[in-house]
Image (tube, rainbow, N blue to C red):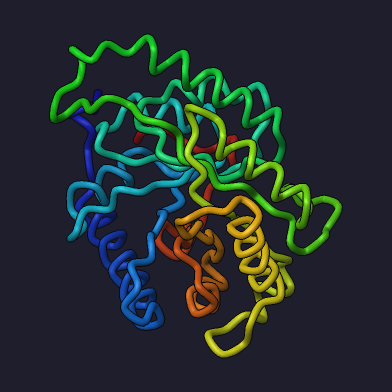
Amino acid sequence: MADVDMKINSQRAAALISQIKTVRERITAVANGRDVRLVAVSKLKPANDILALLQQASPPQLHFGENYAQELGQKAELLPRSILWHFIGGLQSGHCKNLAKIPNLWCVSSVNNQKQARLLDQHRGEFLSSFSSSSASPTTPAPSKLNIHIQVNTSGEPAKSGCEPGEAAVELCRFVEEAPHLHLLGLMTIGAISRSIATTAENENEDFAVLREQRDLVQKELGLDRELELSMGMSEDFEGAIVMGSDEVRIGSTIFGTRPQKSEAKIQV
């Protein structure tokens, strides 16, 4: 339930609204009429900022991304259920139970192995079974299947998360597609930093090209009659990602500004 007494600083709200308006305009300028989802990455930023964009941006910003499971859980407790949360950080098996029980967790975007997918499916199923249909209301909708983006390591960097392109990606997508409490939404990548910096609307990113190829391969191998999403593009490279077909971009600092150290971050101010 939202804390109705949460304070919103008017100057801070005005700055956030101006910044997200600019980002939306930049998205529209390169989207060629497509509806590209903007996920506002609010990690280490207070819930007050999120509430400001939910209540005062026009249209309201609904999709927010968090990198830390505990922080996401705390914010989800404080803020309205109308928010559609995305977990975009490194996923550990120990996160899966608590994440799966957040009613308005809309997507987990960093699944990279079958163990994670199995745990999310198991715990989401348990949560859905325990949720009473009589508890649903217009302001408290019944939770649904979890949307899943499979993270693919398109750059081949050893330190980067994600399953390998090719058979591994196909089989993981097949597993999620068959899981009863998950919905295979698409594929996600975080490209190499050097390539991201060089990416422009005119200069294609190799990692984004690989993800597009993987999406096409998965659709063919699984015989899907729907098009899977591409989630690629962040603050430094989102315009180039959209030109290459991205359906979702994850934008943080361009909207929220410089982040504090994790030790100094506050859930609410």
Tell me if residue 84 comes above or below residue 70 in the rendering. Answer: below
The residue positioned 32% from the left and 13% from the top of the image is 131
154 in relation to 70, above or below: below
Q: Nearer the viewer, residue 157 or 3?
A: 157
Nearer the observer, 123 or 96 = 123
Position of residue 261 measured from the top left corner of the image (x, y, whole percent): 59, 44
Locate residue 81 relative to residue 85 in the image: left or right. Answer: left
Horizontal side of residue 139 vs 131, given as left or right: left
Q: Residue at x 25, y 54 (%)?
A: 13
Left/right of residue 63 with respect to residue 150 in the rendered view: left
Identify the residue at horizontal 63%, vertical 82% (top origin).
Answer: 204
Q: Residue at x 63, y 45 (%)?
A: 173
Q: Is residue 7 visible to the viewer in this orientation of the structure?
A: yes
Outermost residue toward the bottom? 202
Please indicate whether residue 118 sits to the left or right of residue 76 in the image: right
| Image coords of residue 252 (percent x, y) | 47, 57
Do we see residue 44 in this rendering? Answer: no
Q: Position of residue 83 (x, y in %)?
A: 30, 40
In the depicted structure, whether residue 175 falls above or below residue 60: above
Which residue is the extreme one toward the right? 158
Residue 215, picture quadrant: bottom right
